[in-house]
Amino acid sequence: MKQRTFTKGLLASAILATSFTAYTALADEFPNRSIEMIVAYSEGGATDVTARALAQALQSELGQSVVIRNMAGAAGEIGFTQLAQANPDGYTIGFINTPPVVSVPIERDPDFALDDFDLIMNLLDDPTAITVRQGSSIESFEQLVEMAKADPGALTMGGSGIGSHQHFLVEQLSRDYDVPVTYIPFDGSGPSVAATMGGHITASADTIGNVARFVFSGDLRVLAQAANERSEHAPDAPTLKELGYDITLGSMRGVAAPKGVPAERLAILRDAVEKVANDPDFIAEAEKRGEVLGYMDHEEFRKSLDDLNNEILQLWETSPWN
């Protein structure tokens, strides 16, 4: 009887030990619960649309839901801060956008810095385009420059706020090429585009991805694009480099996590995002939306951010905008 009781005790202990081992393995398995994706801009915006497409596709790769959390405000500062200060356990990721993720720490003292992020992958590298309404008498960028120089102050160009890539484009045209432009900051790219189409301002600067649908519909015409090569969404519009202006500007939109995510978890996240990014269906849908894909792994992304940081620092030193 004692022997039987002892045997039962050993069996119970073995079962408990096995259960504990299985529980520990499950706890260490990543991910074993939903992941939050922070978007530092409002619902329905360009970044939000991309983020939701990525989140949906990542669910299949990670086996867990990916939940979007929009935290708009202060040129992205609110969302970037929340991402930087999140628990670095791999369960919080988010989008970081240029130039704000770079320019905000240069122009003020926010609660985040560029080095507060573990980079995962860049998805979009969307060049800035200069557009006019379809009925405008200005048919080329050269004509736009001629008008500006003939009547300083006459050329009004809209964009989404001070410290944006649109604003930096105007600053570079003025500083480096003596093109007088009156910059009109709007609360977002939508109002700027609307003002251009309504004839209230001469032109607007925005990313190709943001204006593509208006170009496709025939409401806007692209005069030039600040890219290294012409976008397939505006193949007839020359790059500024082609026209003799050494300016490349735009908006990178990539995925990052708070600094300090364990290496093995970071590797899982990077692998999952890379697989989605290279999926033909994901690419086809992104191109239908007019998005300009510009994939970079975390090392390329870091170099691009550092290079941009140096460029904006130089611009700040010569033409501070605050």
Image (tube, helix red, strand yellow):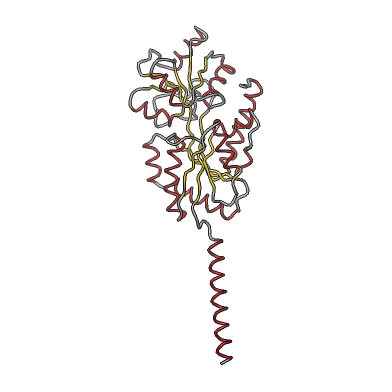
- The image quadrant where one finds the C terminus is top right
Say whether residue 102 is left or right of residue 134. right
- The image quadrant where one finds the N terminus is bottom right
Q: What residue appears at the point 38 percent right and 12 percent down from the top-left corner?
A: 137
Residue 239, percent across and down? 47, 25
Judging depth in this view, the residue of 170 and 117 nearest the camera is: 117
Q: State whether residue 101 is above or below residue 55.
A: above
Q: Residue furthest bottom?
A: 1
Residue 38, percent across and down? 51, 42
Q: What residue appears at the point 47 percent right and 10 percent down from the top-left corner?
A: 147
Residue 276, percent across and down? 44, 48
Q: What residue appears at the point 36 percent right and 37 percent down from the top-left corner?
A: 288
Residue 212, percent across and down? 39, 29
Judging depth in this view, the residue of 1 and 30 nearest the camera is: 1
Picture quarter containing residue 171?
top right
Judging depth in this view, the residue of 48 and 19 nearest the camera is: 19
Say whether residue 44 is left or right of residue 269. left
Judging depth in this view, the residue of 108 and 57 nearest the camera is: 108
Q: Residue furthest top?
A: 150
Q: What residue appears at the point 52 percent right and 8 percent down from the top-left corner?
A: 152
Total numbered circles: 0
Say whether residue 253 is left or right of residue 138. right
Q: State whether residue 132 is above or below residue 97.
A: above
